[in-house]
Amino acid sequence: MAESAKKPKMSKEERAMKRLCGDGFPKNAFNLFNKAIKIVSDKTLEAASSLSEEDLEKAKQILDHMLHSILFLGNIQATCYLPKYIFSDVEMLNRTMNDFPDAFHHYQTYVARRTPFSYFVELVTVCYRQENVMIPTVILILSELLSNCKKSGDLYPLISTVICICETDNLNYYGVSLSCESDREREIMTAVSCLHVWHPKVSSAVMSVFPEGTGNPRSIKLPDKVSCRAYAVEDMSQVKPPCRRCHELYSLPGPSENLNDPGNCAETEAISNLLHCQKGVDDKTTIAVGVYNDQEIRGKMTTCFNENMNKINMKKSKGNHINYNILTVYN
Ligand SMILES: [Zn+2]
């Protein structure tokens, strides 16, 4: 008789749990959030370089948004990852629900503005901003995290494997790739980012070729003094050349042959963060044809968002349908 026939039969619930726990999503979600919590608690306990009151408040807000984003992305998957699958330890689930009630109350109704990993990198930059070896610290933390995460196919669900650093006047701005597992999810996060997060020049450059992937790109040209370098987190010793898309949208020189999806690359977020923070650089940054107006961005991104949400619902069983509005975001 086969070995498996002797085992006690698992309930439907246990089988679902086993299948989900073998996936990268819940494992990486748990690792990411756990690591973020540990960074903040370690920093709080440190005597010498403890966080300022303001930074601590900011860090707590980032944790809350990051958790909401994890739960939101878990909910929009065709196979819904409920919080109990991500926090399979009941005690930890209860503690997290107690510490961050809003994220749990709102993940089924409010859209996340950014990916969990984008919040994670922001958290690291807030917690280690006092250190003068900021870049090596960020690299070390990201590569440590990556080594504990699980791969599904070629990707690490929820984990960005590329980071971009834009530098000007000795100030660094970070960005990471979107790290979405499916095209549906990636298009949803790109639409939300264009409408709510990215600098209007970056949103307009992306939107000129998104979601179609074709069209006349509205290229951005940054001032010469800005450098923009991307690295694979697994090997930070080498600069990763921009893809042809980033060359087309952001005029970055020396592109590779790859053509990535508009908005997906780490360069997008890094350039957007730089333009948001540096008015002088923004003033000197040109964009071909100009930016789209708010109404155009809202119209096109709402359509794209709704189409993708409908496609997800077609894969879900009737009782599990989701209903989000791109204008209702978690703040
Ligand atoms: Zn690119």
Image: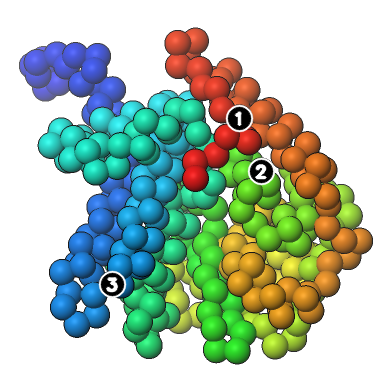
Q: Does residue 326 appear to the left or right of 281 in the view shown?
A: left
In primary-sequence order, the first of circles 3 and 2 is 3
Asked which secondary structure carries label 3, the reply is loop
Q: Which residue lies at the image location 45% right of the left edge and 11% below the top edge?
A: 319
The residue wearing badge 1 is: 325
Q: Residue at x 78, y 55 (%)?
A: 204
Asked whether residue 149 appears in the rendered view, the answer is no
Residue 168 shows in this picture: yes
| C-alpha distance separating marks 3 and 1 | 36 Å
**What residue is shown at x 71% (from left), y 65% (from top)?**
246
- Decide which of tag 1 and tag 2 comes sooner along the chain: 2
Q: Residues within 10 Å of mark 3 (few under 14, many from 20)?
A: many
Contact (Cβ within 8 Å) of mark 1 with mark 2: no
The coloring applied to the image is rainbow
Res. 297 image quadrant: top right
In terms of depth relative to the viewer, which is nearer, 69 or 58?
A: 58
Q: Is residue 84 left or right of residue 105?
A: left
User: The residue under label 2 is which amino acid type?
Assistant: Ala
Q: Amino acid at mark 3?
A: Leu
Of pointers 3 and 1, the one earlier in the residue sequence? 3
Q: Give the foreground label among 1 and 2.
A: 1
The residue tagged 3 is: 51
Residue 93 point in image, percent of width and height = 21, 36
Q: Secondary structure at mark 1?
A: loop
Q: Quadrant of the N terminus?
A: top left
- Residue beneath label 2, please? 191
Give the residue drawn at x 25%, y 52%: 34
* Coordinates of residue 331 in the picture (x, y in percent): 49, 45
Instruction: State the SS at label 2.
Output: helix
